[in-house]
Amino acid sequence: MTAPDLKTPTDLKSNATKSVADALNGALADAYALYLKTKNFHWHVSGPHFRDYHLMFDEQATEILGVTDLIAERVRKTGNVTLRSIGDIARHQTVKDNDAEFVAPADMLKELRDDNLAMVETFRAVKAAATEAGDNATEGIVDDWTDQAEQRAWFLFEAARGA
């Protein structure tokens, strides 16, 4: 239940926006988990393609982090509240952490590719919830996030061919 002080006015029905907010908060948790994993791999990549992967991971992490604020603000615009802590993120994320001491560059590429493809599925679920709720603003903006995740997965796929 949203505290009255945080109840943003909207013409959307609260039960409909709750399902959209739940989907968005799941996407937000996964975006943060993917951001941190991408930065982790950026910091720890090694090998003959170091520079290319290091720069690509940094660019992708920056793009993912940029989406997090947009997702959270969309939750608030629907009259709901968003994630509040690392623990909250951990409770909602489906993207798995990678705490390995060493990950081969080829494995980094494949893992991030798969995680970005999972984000595409998550964004499609957000779109479906938004469509059902009549939330055309969320329905429209999620298309950009989907396209970005698809592009990241494509770049990672192509880079992995030579790894």
Image (cartoon, rainbow, N blue to C red):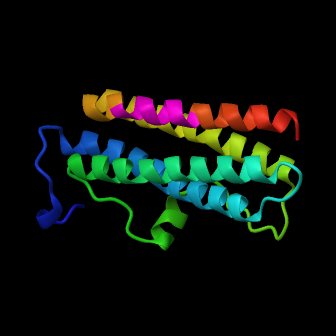
40 left or right, relative to 60: right
> Percent position (x, y) of residue 42?
69, 58
Q: Is residue 80 visible?
A: yes
Check the image and report above or below for 24 versus 146: below
> Percent position (x, y) of residue 69?
37, 53
Check the image and report above or below for 34 versus 12: below
- Picture quadrant where residue 128 is located: top left
Task: Give the quadrant of the C terminus.
Answer: top right
- Picture quadrant where residue 113 is located: top right
The front one of 162 and 6 is: 162
Which residue occupies the extreme front position in the image? 51
Question: What's drawn in magenta, residue-wise?
Answer: 141-149
Q: Is residue 94 visible?
A: no
> Percent position (x, y) of residue 116?
62, 41
> What is the tally of numbered marks visible in this picture?
0
What residue is rendered at 57% in x and 56% in y?
Answer: 35
> Percent position (x, y) of residue 97?
68, 62
Check the image and report above or below for 119 versus 2: above
Q: Is 13 covered by the magenta stretch?
A: no
- Picture quadrant where residue 139 is located: top left
What residue is rendered at 40% in x and 34% in y?
Answer: 142
The front one of 103 and 130 is: 103
What residue is rendered at 42% in x and 45% in y?
Answer: 23
Q: Is 143 covered by the magenta stretch?
A: yes
What residue is rendered at 67% in x and 50% in y?
Answer: 55
Task: Give the quadrant of the N terminus.
Answer: bottom left
Helix, strand or loop for the magenta stretch, by majority: helix
